[in-house]
Image (spheres, rainbow, N blue to C red):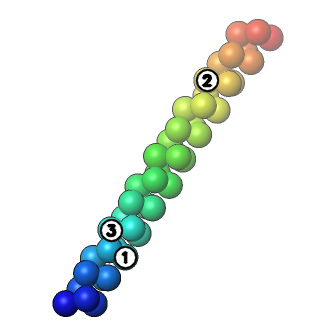
C-alpha cells in the first residue's frame, strides 16, 4: 500500500514539475517577445 502511495506521489510531482517547466518556458517566451516589442518601439 505504501509503495503505491509513493509511486503516485512521485508521478504527481514529476507531472507538476513538467507542467511547471512548460509554463515557465511559455512565460519566458512571452516576456522576451514583450521586451523585443518595447525595444523596437523605443528604438
Residue 36 lies in quadrant? top right
Q: Earlier in the sequence, mark 2 or mark 3?
A: 3
From this view, report whether residue 30 is shown above or below residue 1. above
Image location (x, y in percent) of residue 15: 36, 64
Where residue 32 sits: x, y (%)? 64, 32
Most extreme residue toward the left is: 1
Residue 10 disc label = 1
At a point 44% along the width and 61% down the height, the residue shown is 18
Q: Residues at badges 2 and 1 in contact (C-beta under 8 Å)? A: no
Answer few, some or many: residues within 10 Å of disc 1's Cα (few below 14, many 20 plus, some between 14 and 19).
few
Q: Which residue is mark 2?
A: 34
SS type, badge 3: helix
Q: Nearer the viewer, residue 39 or 13?
A: 13
Q: Residue at x 71, y 10 (%)?
A: 41
Residue to which mark 3 is pinned: 12
| Circles 1, 3 touching at the beta carbon (< 8 Å) | yes
Q: Nearer the viewer, mark 2 or mark 1?
A: 1
Q: Is residue 34 above or below residue 15?
A: above
Percent coordinates x, y for residue 22 in the rendering: 46, 51
- N-terminal of the two: label 2 or label 1? 1
**Contact, CB < 8 Å: mark 2 with mark 3?**
no
Q: What distance separates the C-alpha of mark 1 from that of mark 3?
A: 5 Å
Say what secondary structure mark 1 lies in. helix
Give me the C-alpha separation between circle 2 and circle 3: 33 Å
Judge from the rendering whether residue 15 lies leftward or rightward of residue 30; answer left or right.
left
Q: Secondary structure at mark 2?
A: helix
Q: CA distance from mark 2 to mark 1?
A: 36 Å
Amino acid at each position: 500500500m505504501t509503495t503505491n502511495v509513493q509511486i503516485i506521489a512521485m508521478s504527481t510531482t514529476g507531472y507538476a514539475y513538467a507542467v511547471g517547466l512548460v509554463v515557465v518556458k511559455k512565460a519566458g517566451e512571452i516576456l522576451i517577445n514583450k521586451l523585443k516589442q518595447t525595444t523596437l518601439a523605443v528604438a
